[in-house]
Amino acid sequence: MNILKILQVAAVVLTIVTGLISLIAPRSVFGFTGLEAPGPRGISEIRSILGGVFIGLGIAVFILGTQQTYQMLGITYLAIAVVRLVSIFVDKASERSNWISLAVEIVFGILLIL
């Protein structure tokens, strides 16, 4: 397995891990994302969207196992990065954690598209 493939697999695994953390411990995402759920409905959203979508996207890559599925996840990360960058300026959300997320999304996006 070459270094690029190892990095791609690592990005997919970290995507799934992010989803699992959001699913299992939804209140723990506040420290990094700023999302907080004051009630059951909000917790359900964190579990289903941050948890379910990230887990589903990551598992799909491994189940389907094609280069196109890696690229699809990469495009997803780059789309998130573009929207986050706009949000950083429009919403005046220039916080360290937002810049870190942006960097990770760009790196994962590029790695997965290659």
Image: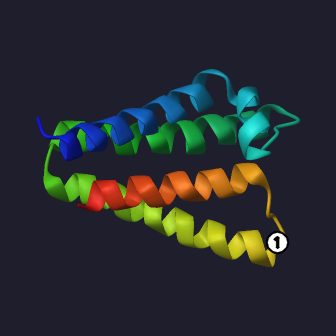
Q: Residue at x 76, y 28 (%)?
A: 27
Q: Is residue 76 left or right of residue 90?
A: left
Observer-nearest residue: 112 or 73? 112
Q: Residue at x 79, y 45 (%)?
A: 34
- Toward which corner of the image does residue 73 lie, by quadrant? bottom left
Q: Residue at x 82, y 72 (%)?
A: 91
Q: Residue at x 51, y 34 (%)?
A: 19
Q: Residues within 10 Å of mark 1 (few under 14, many from 20)?
A: few
Callout 1 secondary element: loop
Q: Is residue 110 above or below residue 66?
A: below
Quadrant where the C terminus sits is: bottom left
Could one spot residue 81 in this view of the protein?
A: yes
Q: Is residue 61 above or below residue 23?
A: below
Q: Position of residue 58 (x, y in %)?
A: 35, 40
Badge 1 is on which residue?
A: 91
Q: Position of residue 45 (x, y in %)?
A: 67, 42
Observer-nearest residue: 59 or 70? 70
